[in-house]
Amino acid sequence: MKKRLLLAIGLFVFLSLEASALNIDQVRKHVFEGDYKAAIVEGEKALAQVSEDSPVVDELHYLMGACYLREGHLTRASDIFEIIINEHKNSRFYQDARMGLGDVYFLRGHFSKAVPIYQKILKEDPATEIKSRLYYRLGRFVFTTGDLEEGKVYVSDMQKPAPPALPPESKEKKNAYVLLENKEGYSLQVGAFSQEKNARDLAEQLNKKNYPVYIEEIKGPGKIKFRVKVGRFKDKAGALKQQSRLSGEGYSTIICPPFSSNP
């Protein structure tokens, strides 16, 4: 009787591991295809089945956090990244999860929280495999401050071959070229808000569509305005081209010359 019980327990554990492995394969497939909603559905099923000591639990959490981030569910993404950071410190996805948490803050416009996370990862692990992506994020932040020369240094560093540079087709590299076009810095204003949350909501929407978006905080007499902007362009023609794309998707925009402060 005891042997049968042990056999049944062993079989249950084996089948559970097999099921979670099959689910994570489906999650990976959906992520590879860019179907983040489907990945979330499969991932939630897998999380309900997988045990905390499973060899795939950290990867599953990371994939789920990344998918929720891409879909704009920032609170859920933040919760999942913090699970990895707090409970899986030896995971190969640990640094990626820290960067993901930084991205949540970045998308919310909380640069004072996002930037130290990126900088701390680089300081603690100068050879990290995500170094190029961290440089890109820091470059984006510096561009929002108007310091184009420092921004160009960050984005130039991300092209260096060691540690591995970003692949040519990566979203970060494509957007970096927009930011780096040169110091003239034409940009497109897509919205201006008195409420930070409204600016963050629009920025998240544009980020999901792969626009190089950022938020500028403009302080005036007795008030603060949050401007949602896209890109840095070497001339007005480049800005007009991007403006046409945005207009085609229903966004009204204003072309801002270098260091413009128009409302």
Image (cartoon, grey):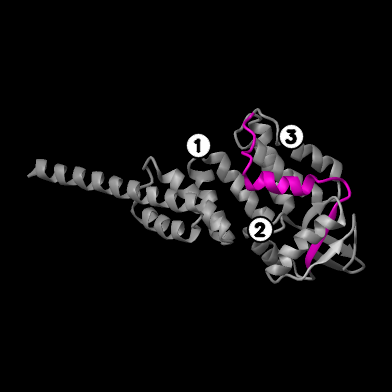
Q: Nearer the viewer, mark 3 or mark 1?
A: 3
Which residue sits furthest right?
A: 221
Q: Is any atom of residue 171 visible in this view?
A: yes
At 92% from the left and 67% from the top, the residue drawn is 221
Residue 174 picture location, percent across and down: 68, 47
Q: Is residue 148 above or below residue 218?
A: above
Q: Nearer the viewer, mark 1 or mark 2?
A: 2
Region rendered in magenta: 163-191
Disc nearer the start of the sequence (1/2): 1
- The quarter of the picture where the N terminus appears is top left
- Judging by the rendered image, the residue that carries numbered circle 1 is 92
Instruction: Classify mark 2: residues with Cα within 10 Å, few (<14), some (14-19) or many (20+).
Output: some
Residue 191 picture location, percent across and down: 77, 68
- The secondary element bearing badge 2 is classed as helix
Residue 169 included in the magenta stretch of the image = yes
Residue situated in front as seen by the camera: 86 or 120: 120
- Residue 157, label in figure: 3
At 74% from the left and 45% from the top, the residue drawn is 177
- Judging by the rendered image, the residue that carries numbered circle 2 is 207
How far apart are the alpha carbons under marks 1 and 2?
A: 26 Å
How far apart are the alpha carbons under marks 3 and 2?
A: 23 Å
Instruction: Classify mark 3: residues with Cα within 10 Å, few (<14), some (14-19) or many (20+).
Output: some
- The secondary element bearing badge 3 is classed as helix
Three-letter code, disc 2: Asn
Q: Is the residue under label 1 in contact with that under label 3 (CB below 8 Å)?
A: no
Three-letter code, disc 1: Arg
- Left or right of 188, for residue 209: left
Residue 62 picture location, percent across and down: 50, 47
